Amino acid sequence: MNQVLDKIREVIRTNQNIVLLSGSEVTKETGLNGIRAEHIAYDIEQKYGYSSDEIVSSLFLSRSVETFYDYYRNIILNKSDVELTKVHRAAAKLEREGKLTAVITKAVYGHFEQAGCKNVVELYGSAEENRCPVCGRFYDSKFIKESHNAPKCVDCEVVLRPGFSLYGEMIDNGRLTKASNAIEYADVLIVAGTSLNSLSWENTIRYYGGDKLILINTEEKSGDERADFRAYGNLSEIFTYITDLDKESTDSIQTEEEKNR
Ligand SMILES: [Zn+2]
């Protein structure tokens, strides 16, 4: 295995206070689109006549609730029976070992919790916690997926509120504080599945002032040089190796060092 991955593995092995920031590529490995679904932006425009940012907004929800829920069912919940990836498993392993302080994600699927992580900050909330605005009853993603038109509370017959923040709404302040504190006091920050310059993450990453910023992504992006260690390739394969999750093949992993040779 190449040197960069060995160095990253050593940093993880010898440190305790690690925070994982999980970006959209981690979700993509499961086959789910995510809320924003940037990789199918064109298809979304074609189908709905609006961008994902326009649809996932409080204004759109109030004006076109059925279209909003069509998007929710077919774009955000595009796949059922999703398998957790090695990234989720690796995070749970590190948490069990007392090394991982927090996972921070904007994904809404609850995957890290399903893998066994307890310290997860879901900045946008969760697709498993849709709520009746009248009685407060929660409805999971399965209920949304199997609903028609605009899903309603079975008791109150009122249209549900999605369990995640919409664009144009404030992100929950408690969650933001929890995330920024975890990052600020982390010894090691692993940024996975996003670039350091990503518009949706750069303000969060900025809280980290340490010297062990590890970037793991599918491909190189400008601004990545700021990371102290970085590796590119299949996220699950890289996480399997750097956390000793098991002994699966890591041949397809490519790092900066190899590329420059
Ligand atoms: Zn209700």
Image (cartoon, helix red, strand yellow):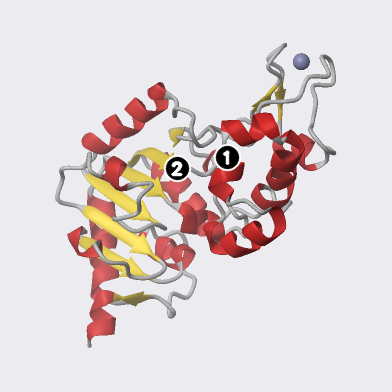
Reading the image, the residue beneath label 2 is 105
Q: Please indicate whether residue 2 sits to the left or right of residue 105 in the image.
A: left
Q: Position of residue 127 (x, y in %)?
A: 63, 36
Depth check: give the residue in front, 161 or 168.
168
Can I make out residue 128 in this image?
A: no
Residue 198 as seen in the image, left or right of residue 143: left
Residue type at numbered disc 2:
Thr
- In the picture, residue 79 is in which quadrant? bottom right
Circle 2 crowding by C-alpha within 10 Å: few under 14, some 14–19, many from 20: many
Establish if 111 lies above or below 11: above
Q: Which residue is mark 1?
A: 110
Disc 1 residue type (three-letter): Gly
Q: Are marks 1 and 2 in contact (CB under 8 Å)?
A: no
- Of 148 and 55, nearer the camera is 55
Q: Which mark is residue 220?
A: none
Could you say where residue 99 lies in the image, as x and y percent from the top left? 33, 42
On the rendered image, what quadrant is the C terminus found in? Answer: bottom left
Per the model, the C-alpha gap separating discs 1 and 2 is: 10 Å
Identify whether 254 is placed above or below 142: below
> x and y percent of residue 185 in the render?
22, 34
Numbered-mark total:
2
As displayed, is residue 40 above or below residue 22? below
State whether residue 161 appears in this view.
yes
Q: Quadrant of ligand 1?
A: top right
Secondary structure type for disc 2: strand
Q: Position of residue 57 (x, y in %)?
A: 57, 36
Q: Please give the name of the residue rendered at 42% of the width and 68% of the height, measured from the top-left corner.
A: 218
